[in-house]
Image (cartoon, rainbow, N blue to C red):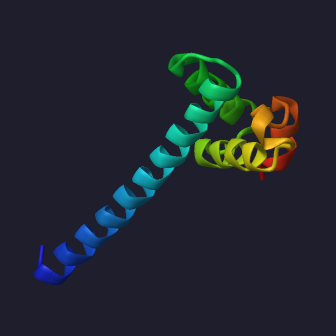
Amino acid sequence: MNLEAEVESLRRENAELREHLATRKLVERAKGLLMKCRRLSERQAFRLLQKTSMDTRQPMAEVALAVIRSAQTAVPLTSCEPVALSEWRWRVR
């Protein structure tokens, strides 16, 4: 493998790792919201995200983002009551 090809390979790997880290951050944030607002354990919150992802055939990052957005737009914010899970499916695209 020549130097240019190796550099390109490392750039691709770097981009993939950055994307993976960004996804992980979204999932962790969504889990935290679910744990706080729905009083779920970490395992339950992750499973809810995972199941919703599978049921809607959407990437986990998209489901996590829908959870985060629904929590941010919940009214009143002090109630910590995000949009119902059934509505997340319509928001995830």
The residue lying at 54 percent from left, 47 percent from top is 26
- Residue 9 or residue 1, whichever sits in front: 9
Left or right of 32 in this view: 81: right
The residue lying at 44 percent from left, 58 percent from top is 19
Instruction: From this view, report whether residue 69 is shown above or below residue 14.
Output: above
Instruction: From this view, report whether residue 12 is shown above or below residue 45.
Output: below
Picture quadrant where residue 6 is located: bottom left
Left or right of 76 in this view: 35: left
Quarter of the image with the N terminus in it: bottom left
Picture quadrant where residue 14 is located: bottom left
The residue lying at 81 percent from left, 50 percent from top is 73
- Residue 31 or residue 56, whichever sits in front: 31
Q: Which residue lies furthest to the left in this view?
A: 2
- Residue 52 or residue 46, whichever sits in front: 46
* Residue 52 horizontal/vertical position (percent): 71, 31
Q: Which residue lies furthest to the bottom in this view?
A: 4
Q: Residue furthest front?
A: 78
